Image (tube, helix red, strand yellow):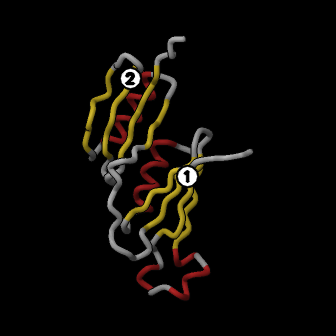
Amino acid sequence: MATSLTTYLLFHNNCREAMNYYHEILGGDLKIMTLGDSPMKEQMPPESANLVMHAFLQTPGFALMASDGMMGPAPANGDAVEMALGVDSVEEAERLFSKLSDGGNIKMPLQETFWAHRYGQLTDKFGMHWMVSYNKPMPM
């Protein structure tokens, strides 16, 4: 059975900015479709043409999808959800943590723990929650 799980983020009128930011930091291939590019454009008010209907960031290790909240109320960022980025070097953990925390809030500084060479938690400037981890081998 082929199964996958992809994180889907909802933004309020700043999806393009956020996804371009994540693309700059994480790399991969980013595709963005606005409401104005979609078949739904005739059903939407003209001021919504630049809202992101669907954004898709594909990297070798994961996919991240997102959209603007389609003119509804601003979504509340879920405090029960965090995106966990696993990396394979101290340098990559430090680079990603530094970039993602820029303009955001560090909840736990990047540091060595008993389970990780580096682990830290942050909320980025868009209010999204992240964990960055370069794990140690698990004891058998």
Identified by mark 1, the residue type is Leu
User: Where residue 33 appears, x then y in whole percent?
Assistant: 56, 68
User: 131 or 33, which lies in front?
Assistant: 131
Q: Is residue 91 above or below residue 4?
A: above
User: Where residue 105 appears, x then y in whole percent?
Assistant: 25, 43
- Residue corresponding to mark 1: 57
**Is disc 1 placed on a helix, strand or loop?**
strand
Tell me the quarter of the picture where residue 28 sits.
Answer: top right
Q: Is residue 119 above or below residue 131?
A: above
Query: Which image quarter is the C terminus in?
Result: top right
Q: Residue at x 40, y 44 (%)?
A: 82
Circle 1 or circle 2, nearest the eye:
2
Q: Is residue 129 above or below residue 90?
A: below
User: Where residue 21 appears, x then y in whole percent?
Assistant: 42, 51
- Residue corresponding to mark 2: 118
Q: Disc 1 and disc 2: Cα gap in Å?
A: 25 Å
User: 24 or 10, which lies in front?
Assistant: 10
Q: Residue at x 58, y 48 (%)?
A: 5
- Which numbered circle lies on residue 19? none
How packed mark 2 is, by other alpha carbons closer than 10 Å (few <14, some 14-19, many 20 or more), is: many
Identified by mark 2, the residue type is Arg
Q: Residue at x 45, y 38 (%)?
A: 84
User: Where residue 118 appears, x then y in whole percent?
Assistant: 38, 23
How packed mark 1 is, by other alpha carbons closer than 10 Å (few <14, some 14-19, many 20 or more), is: many
User: 10 or 52, which lies in front?
Assistant: 10
Q: Are marks 1 and 2 in contact (CB under 8 Å)?
A: no
**Is disc 2 placed on a helix, strand or loop?**
strand
First-in-chain label (1 vs 2): 1
Query: Which image quarter is the N terminus in?
Result: top right
Q: Residue at x 49, y 42 (%)?
A: 26
